[in-house]
Structure formats: structure tokens, C-alpha cells
Image (spheres, rainbow, N blue to C red):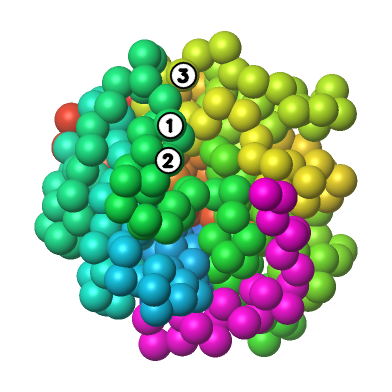
């Protein structure tokens, strides 16, 4: 069944559901960063969101729209960790049972976060098993609702509330952003933000940021059709390792994206280090991809007003130590 594309009114409605649940995360500035890139930067700190990433927004919006019968059957999700924690937290708040299909190589900090919120984990090998097939089988067995990590209108609308907040805050400051840079895995956050930008700040150009080897959005944008990544794992940006853009997210993003900055693992780790040392924020590599894109010049911020989405801070101590020496 093909789901309808969400629209900006869905983002507005999601914001109402998330009121008093999601954190209104700050839009930060840093003089040292402005000087480094030669422009004016606003940092949307979703690393300070409930569960440590923006993912709670989409998860809570989607779960809150389930019918009473669906709630009784519970929910199933598949995720490398951040959507998993978002669904687990939303399910805990709403009193629902949740089973999360997670890769065996998911960061331990993310597994711990899921378990601490009362959800169950079904582990799988991302190289040899299909998380979609596993999740569908669990749903067929229990009648649970499947909550995709990005390709779902309610999830996209929920993620878009971060963009809504961003543009409303900038308007209150009397600022119009020339561009916004956001990491992209499946494209749900980026899609929600583009809907908000189109309605509230149409002058703002939207850029994605992806890891090398997992640049399916960049290549899809260039070719005019969805492409699939050759690899399934092997980057420190574990939160961004999707195989291909979603059907809904691609339909929303493809005509609206101005471009995608593709960053190396080293650049992502260096951005994590910069976040810690200069911004005084804890970021995970995938959550720092947009920051990496402007620090490396993959997206030019010189003489521009740029919003950078800092999307997550759930980083294992070993990876964080690796970043500090990058």
C-alpha cells in the first residue's frame, strides 16, 4: 500500500502532539565556528533532545496516532539505535509493548538505551539478514504495528517539527537562513525539514550530508532516480547507513534538495572532536555529518547564514575516544 505524502499541515499537527513531550532544543551560535567557516552559523542541537536524537519526534507522533486496538498489540521497529530508542521511549510513555530489530553491531550505548526504556531487542546480522523481513514476520505473528524509521508520513511529519522550530526561532530573531545542512540516512528528517522550509522559509536552500560509501541520496539526486549503496556496513556513521532513499522521502527531497555534501569517516570524527572541544557538545559521528560538511568545505558556508542540524549524541566511549585523537 502506497502511503500519501505528508504536507506542512501534518508537521503543524505533529507539533501539537509533541507539545510538552519533545524538548524545544536550542538554536546555538559560536563565534569560533563563525570565524572558522567565514559565515554565520546557527546550530540546532537535537543531540539535546529526549533520547539524545531527533528520532523521538517522529516516533512519538506515529505512536500517538495508533488506534486503541493497534496500541494493545504493540509496535515493532527496525533501527541501528536512534529510532530504536525513540520508539522505545514513546512506547514507554504511552504504555505500549515494543520490539526493536537491531543489528548485532549497533553501538552498545544505543542497545542499552533501548533496554533501559523497557523494549525488547531482536538482534540480526546486517550483512546476511533482512531487518524488514524480520520485522514483518514479528508483526504478522503478533498483530503489532510496524513503525518504520523514516519512510512513513507520521514519522516524517514528526521529524519536521525540528525544522518548524528552527524557522520560527529564526523569524523571531529577524534572521533568514541562506541554507540549512542536515545529515541524511533514509531521509525522513530531511524530508520533514524541507516541508517546513517550503512553507516558512522558501528562500533557504536545503543541503544533505552523507558518509562516503553511503551517498545514495547524492547519487540519486545526480542520476534522477533512486540508487542503492553497494555496502551495508563499515562506517563510523552508523546512524546513516541505509541502503537507498525511501519512496516517500525521495519523492519529497529529490525536487527540493540543493545538493549533498559527502564526508569521510575522518571528517565526521573530526567534527565530533570539534563539537567536544569548541562547541562543548557531545555528538556521534552520524549526528555530526552536517557539521563535518561545513568544516570540510563540502558545503560552502562562507559569507552565508547557515543552519546546521546536530542530530544525535549517542556515541560509544570507544568511538568518542577515537574521535578525540582524529
Percent coordinates x, y for residue 220 in the rendering: 76, 28
Q: Cα distance, mark 3 to mark 2?
A: 20 Å
Mark 3 or 1: the one toward you: 1
- Which residue position holds label 2? 136
The numbered mark, 3 or 2, whose residue comes first in the sequence reads 2
Taking the image as shown, residue 6 lies to the left or right of residue 108, namely: right
Residue range of the region highlighted in magenta in the rendering:
1-21
Secondary element at tag 3: loop
Is residue 13 located in the magenta-colored stretch of the structure? yes
Secondary element at tag 2: helix
Give yes or no for contact between labels 2 and 1 (Cβ–Cβ under 8 Å).
yes
Taking the image as shown, residue 281 lies to the left or right of residue 171, namely: left
Numbered badge on residue 133: 1
Confirm whether residue 87 shows in the render: yes
Taking the image as shown, residue 121 lies to the left or right of residue 173, namely: left
Give yes or no for contact between labels 3 and 1 (Cβ–Cβ under 8 Å).
no
Give yes or no for contact between labels 3 and 2 (Cβ–Cβ under 8 Å).
no
The numbered mark, 3 or 1, whose residue comes first in the sequence reads 1
- Which residue position holds label 3? 232
Percent coordinates x, y for residue 276 in the rendering: 32, 47
Secondary element at tag 1: helix
Percent coordinates x, y for residue 43 in the rendering: 53, 60
Amino acid at each position: 500500500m502506497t502511503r500519501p505524502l505528508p504536507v506542512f499541515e501534518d508537521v503543524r499537527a505533529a507539533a501539537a502532539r509533541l507539545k510538552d513531550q519533545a524538548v524545544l532544543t536550542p538554536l546555538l551560535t559560536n563565534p569560533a565556528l563563525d570565524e572558522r567557516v567565514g559565515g554565520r552559523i546557527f546550530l540546532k542541537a537535537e543531540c539535546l533532545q529526549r533520547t539524545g536524537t531527533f528520532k523521538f519526534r517522529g516516533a512519538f507522533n506515529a505512536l500517538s496516532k495508533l488506534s486503541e486496538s493497534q496500541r494493545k498489540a504493540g509496535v515493532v521497529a527496525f533501527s541501528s539505535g536512534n529510532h530504536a530508542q525513540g520508539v522505545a521511549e514513546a512506547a514507554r510513555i504511552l504504555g505500549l509493548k515494543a520490539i526493536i530489530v537491531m543489528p548485532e553491531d549497533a553501538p552498545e550505548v544505543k542497545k542499552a538505551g533501548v533496554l533501559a526504556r523497557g523494549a525488547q531487542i531482536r538482534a540480526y546480522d546486517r550483512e546476511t539478514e533482512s531487518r524488514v523481513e524480520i520485522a514483518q514476520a514479528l508483526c504478522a505473528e503478533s498483530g503489532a504495528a510496524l513503525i518504520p524509521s523514516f519512510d512513513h508520513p507520521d514519522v516524517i511529519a514528526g521529524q519536521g517539527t525540528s525544522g518548524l522550530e528552527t524557522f520560527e526561532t529564526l523569524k523571531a530573531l529577524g534572521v533568514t537562513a541562506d541554507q540549512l545542512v542536515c545529515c541524511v540516512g533514509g531521509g525522513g528528517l530531511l524530508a520533514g525539514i524541507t516541508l517546513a522550509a517550503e512553507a516558512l522559509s522558501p528562500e533557504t536552500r536545503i543541503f544533505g550530508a552523507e558518509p562516503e560509501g553511503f551517498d545514495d541520496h547524492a547519487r540519486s539526486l545526480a542520476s534522477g532516480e533512486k540508487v542503492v549503496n553497494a555496502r551495508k556496513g563499515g562506517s563510523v556513521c552508523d546512524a546513516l547507513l541505509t541502503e537507498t532513499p525511501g519512496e516517500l522521502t525521495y519523492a519529497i527531497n529529490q525536487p527540493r534538495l540543493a545538493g549533498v555534501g559527502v564526508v569521510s569517516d575522518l571528517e565526521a570524527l573530526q567534527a565530533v572532536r570539534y563539537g567536544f572541544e569548541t562547541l562543548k557538545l557531545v555528538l556521534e559521528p552520524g549526528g555530526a555529518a552536517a557539521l563535518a560538511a561545513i568544516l570540510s568545505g563540502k558545503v560552502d558556508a562562507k559569507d552565508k547564514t547557515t543552519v546546521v542540524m546536530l542530530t544525535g549524541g549517542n556515541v560509544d566511549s570507544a568511538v568518542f575516544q577515537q574521535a578525540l585523537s582524529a
